Image (cartoon, rainbow, N blue to C red):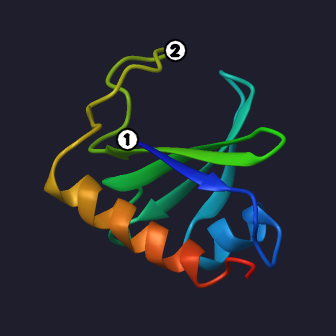
Amino acid sequence: MKIYFEKKFKENPETIIRRSGYAKIFDRRSNQTSYVRRLSNNFYPRFHMYAEETDNQLILNIHLDQKKPSYKKQTAHSADYSGETIEREVERIKKFFESYRRA
């Protein structure tokens, strides 16, 4: 699920993402940086977020990874891209980012 924000924040968007409970990770297979927030002490399930910035917009793309990829060298995994759990997390993130919005 994608979340769109105007880039009018008091702080750097990456700082806000990390303060909201997400840790930065780097996937060597895809050569991409993303963010995760664990739901327990285990690696899965976890929220997984990609951030993209344009000149005036921040786009967060979030899903829920249920488990790690089943096959070696595969990026396919069991994930939820919508539903009540995702919607609650999106609302939490929106409220968090609103607290850092510049007037």
Quarter residue 79 falls in = top left
Residue, x 40% and y 54% (percent of image)? Answer: 47
In the foreground, 67 or 53: 53
Q: Residue at the far front: name it.
A: 103
Q: Nearer the viewer, residue 63 or 94?
A: 94
- State left or right for residue 32 relative to residue 80: right
**Comes first in the chain, label 2 or label 1:** 1
Identify the amino acid type marked 1.
Met
- Image mark for residue 94: none
User: In this picture, is 68 found above or below 5?
Assistant: above
Identify the residue at the far left of this view.
84
Q: Callout 2 environment at 10 Å: few (<14), some (14 to 19), or many (20+)? A: few
- Quarter holding the N terminus is top left
Q: Quadrant of the C terminus?
A: bottom right
Which percent across, then down, holds residue 39?
33, 68
- Among the 4 quarters of the image, the one containing residue 52: top right
Q: Which residue is mark 2?
A: 73
Look at the numbered disc 1 and give the secondary structure of its residue: loop
Disc 2 versus disc 1: nearer the observer: 1
Instruction: Using the image, determine if residue 56 lies above or below residue 12.
Output: above
Label 1 belongs to which residue? 1
Residue nearest the observer in this picture, 79 or 86: 86
Residue at 37% across / 37% down in the picture? 68
Mark 2 residue type: Lys
Name the element at disc 2. Answer: loop
Picture coordinates of residue 15 (x, y %)? 76, 71
Looking at the image, residue 15 sits to the left or right of residue 87; the answer is: right
Across and down, in percent, residue 95 comes to 46, 77
Q: Is residue 41 left or right of residue 80?
A: right
Label 2, label 1: how far apart the Cα atoms are: 25 Å
In the picture shown, does residue 42 fall above or below 79? below
